[in-house]
Image: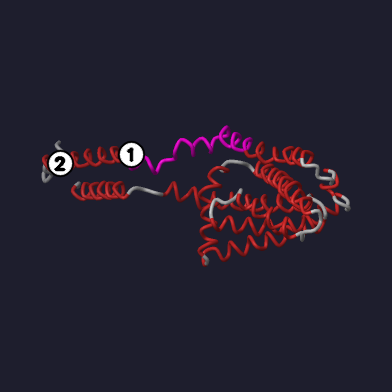
């Protein structure tokens, strides 16, 4: 017995099949087009997400940051700074006291960071600074575990502080032979520190103020260790937070972006399927 629908028009069925074929063809063409490819992860992003990618980035950061320590030692010896390196590290206090000072000195910096996060959406310079870090720095650090971020932070803390506060600031003080105020070497060193971080005006101002804070801390305690501890701990807290923020905000936005042309094709495909199901018995 013939069970076919007597009202079904073979020509309409052929046209529906042709529409479905054309829709799938256009969709495949859009997915392979250069415009759509910009929404796919680039080769560099894929490499950074791989284990070999983040290990390579971590190695470069650690080598550069920790290399500043022996460079600072050589400059201290070459420039004839009288303060011994061991005394620069601890000062007149024990290592436990210097480390404790560094922990306490981190509290105002973390407080400032929290305030900056809260006020960022309402103040353009802070918003610009936050977007700069999330779009330029954090993509480089994607995939690096917490212990890797800790190594980077320790390298930045001890390497940069020994180079700027341990060498440059003490060398500038020696040039004045005790006749200049201590604030002049602190401000000049902070200015040089900010220039090395001058990726934007907002970032320059922030690192300049932080440099003054670390310089005063080094002079107050007579030791590099408190400033290095505070620098490293602050960097680790900030990087750990921004890394989690990058995972929550950055990655879903990239995966959810769909070209407008592709949305039109998908809607056309859905309407075609709906009309086909309506015409069928």
Q: Where's residue 25, x and y in %?
A: 25, 37
Locate residue 108: give its quadrant: bottom right
Q: Residue at x 20, y 46 (%)?
A: 280
Q: Residue furthest top?
A: 52
Q: Is residue 35 magenta?
A: yes
Residues 79 and 126: in front is 79
Q: Is residue 127 magenta?
A: no
Q: Where's residue 156, x and y in %?
A: 68, 45
Q: First in sequence: mark 1 or mark 2?
A: 2
Q: How is the image coloured?
A: secondary structure
Q: Which residues are magenta?
A: 34-60
Residues 243 and 186: in front is 186
Name the disc covering residue 34, or none: 1
Q: Please state which of the two labelled residues, at mark 1 or mark 2, is closer to the viewer.
A: 1
Name the disc covering residue 114, or none: none
Q: Where's residue 12, x and y in %?
A: 13, 43
Q: Residue at x 34, y 42 (%)?
A: 36
Locate residue 56: give its quadrant: top right
Q: Is residue 29 left or right of residue 4?
A: right
Locate residue 8: give its quadrant: top left
The quadrant of the picture occupied by the N terminus is top left
Q: Where's residue 184, x and y in %?
A: 72, 58
Image position of 117 with respect to 46: above or below: below
Residues 123 and 151: in front is 123
10 Å neighbourhood of mark 2: few (<14), some, or many (≥20)? few
Give the secondary structure at mark 2: helix
Q: Which residue is mark 2?
A: 15
Q: Is residue 80 left or right of residue 251?
A: right
Give the secondary structure at mark 1: helix
Mark 1 → mark 2, Cα distance in angstroms: 30 Å
Secondary structure predominantly adopted by residues drawn in magenta: helix
Image position of 115 with respect to 61: above or below: below
């Amino acid at each position: 017995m013939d069970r076919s629908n007597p009202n079904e028009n073979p020509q309409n069925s052929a046209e529906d099949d042709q529409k479905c074929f054309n829709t799938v063809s256009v969709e495949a063409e859009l997915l392979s087009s250069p415009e759509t490819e910009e929404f796919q992860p680039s080769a560099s992003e894929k490499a950074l997400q791989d284990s070999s990618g983040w290990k390579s980035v971590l190695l470069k950061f650690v080598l550069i940051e920790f290399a500043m320590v022996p460079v600072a030692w050589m400059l201290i010896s070459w420039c004839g700074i009288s303060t011994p390196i061991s005394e620069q590290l601890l000062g007149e206090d024990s290592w436990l006291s210097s480390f404790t000072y560094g922990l306490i000195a981190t509290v105002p910096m973390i407080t400032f960071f929290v305030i900056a996060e809260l006020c960022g959406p309402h103040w353009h310079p802070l918003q610009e600074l936050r977007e700069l870090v999330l779009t330029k720095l954090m993509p480089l650090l994607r995939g690096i575990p917490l212990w890797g971020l800790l190594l980077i932070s320790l390298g930045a803390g001890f390497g940069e502080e020994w180079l700027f506060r341990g060498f440059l600031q003490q060398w500038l003080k020696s040039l004045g032979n005790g006749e200049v105020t201590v604030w002049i070497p602190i401000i000049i060193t902070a200015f040089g520190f900010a220039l090395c971080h001058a990726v934007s005006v907002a970032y320059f101002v922030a690192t300049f103020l932080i440099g003054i804070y670390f310089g005063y801390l080094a002079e107050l305690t007579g030791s590099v260790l408190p400033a290095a501890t505070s620098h490293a701990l602050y960097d680790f807290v900030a990087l750990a937070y921004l890394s989690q923020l990058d995972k929550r905000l950055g990655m879903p936005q990239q995966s959810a972006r769909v070209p407008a042309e592709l949305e039109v094709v998908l809607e056309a495909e859905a309407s075609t399927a709906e009309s086909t199901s309506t015409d069928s018995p």
